[in-house]
Image (cartoon, helix red, strand yellow):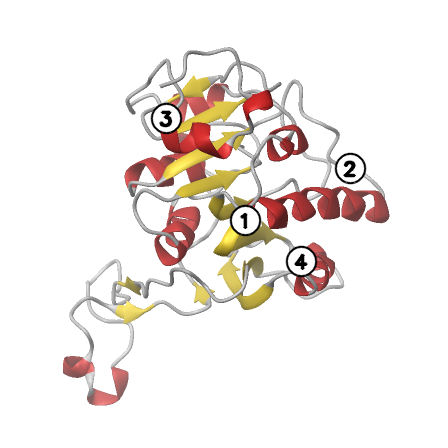
Amino acid sequence: MLPVPALITSRGALFRSDCLELLGAVRPESIACVFADPPFNLGKDYGAGAREDLRGDEAYLHWCRSWLSECCRVLAPGGALFVYNLPRWLVPIGAFLMERLDFRHWIALTMKSTYPRGGRLYPAHYGLLYFTKGAPRIFNKLRVPVPACRHCGRDLKDYGGHRGALNPAGLSLTDFWEDTSPVRHRKFKTRAANELKPMIPRRALEMSTDPGDLVLDPFGGGGSTYKAAEECGRHWLGCEIGDCAPILERLASFDTRSRLPVVVRSALTARSLPLVRMR
């Protein structure tokens, strides 16, 4: 049985538990979208209760295959799976998923910085794998604002003299995202370790789900996915094995409840339901 949730809102529920414990409690084919931002095996300190983030390569990949298999199991037909990680790990992860799901995109997210890297090319991007369980049930075309100079406000490109022909809603989103540099400033972070900009999972959710759909993020971190789900009208289910305080802080402005939302409860097996009042 899952523990009593650390947080219940009108749209979702957060459990302090291991990701495999939560995934094992979810019914097959009940989740519209899984967004996973796992530890990168870099030896980061994720706080009290978190597992060690530094294993041998095979041990790390074995663990990844365990939770990825569960993600594939709980994903509904046509549902989407997004995995955010370093290219080093996304290559074997992608090979594993290619045997189980349909590949859609490798999305490159810029990681601009000035850190030296010695005798290697500077790693200027992280990756976001996008797979679906068969043909996508939902694919919403997104647009982004036309890039402009932050000083003068003028367009950064001239678009070959065809600026007037551009869609007023903006440019079509591509598989290269240039506005995703990591959250580094303390002013915008809720925890000491790296955390994801909410706009990254938000784009994934808006692209692959509709309002009311259920999203699962098995690595809560700073709560970016859950905030994105709340703001764009999706239900959500998540867990964090370490300190949940950063997530609770991020979601403090949203409506809390004492009962699991119906959509969330229906995705959990009866034997796994925690001892809280159910709607």
Question: To which residue does mark 4 refer?
Answer: 90
Which of disc 4 and disc 2 is earlier in sequence?
Answer: 2
Q: Quadrant of residue 45?
A: top right
Q: Nearest the camera: 229 or 114?
A: 229
Say above or below: 162 vs 1: below
At x 71% / y 41%, what residue is drawn? 42
Question: To which residue does mark 1 refer?
Answer: 75
Q: Nearer the viewer, mark 1 or mark 4?
A: 1
Which of disc 4 and disc 1 is earlier in sequence?
Answer: 1
Question: To which residue does mark 2 refer?
Answer: 54
Q: Residues within 10 Å of mark 2 (few under 14, many from 20)?
A: some
Question: To which residue does mark 3 refer?
Answer: 261
Q: Residue most toward the front?
A: 270
Which of disc 3 and disc 2 is earlier in sequence?
Answer: 2
Question: Left or right of 121: which side holds 83?
Answer: left
Is mark 4 in CB contact (under 8 Å) with mark 3?
no
Residue type beneath disc 3: Pro
**Residue 3 position within the rendered picture, expressed as x and y whole percent measured from the top left:** 58, 15
Q: Nearer the viewer, mark 1 or mark 2?
A: 1
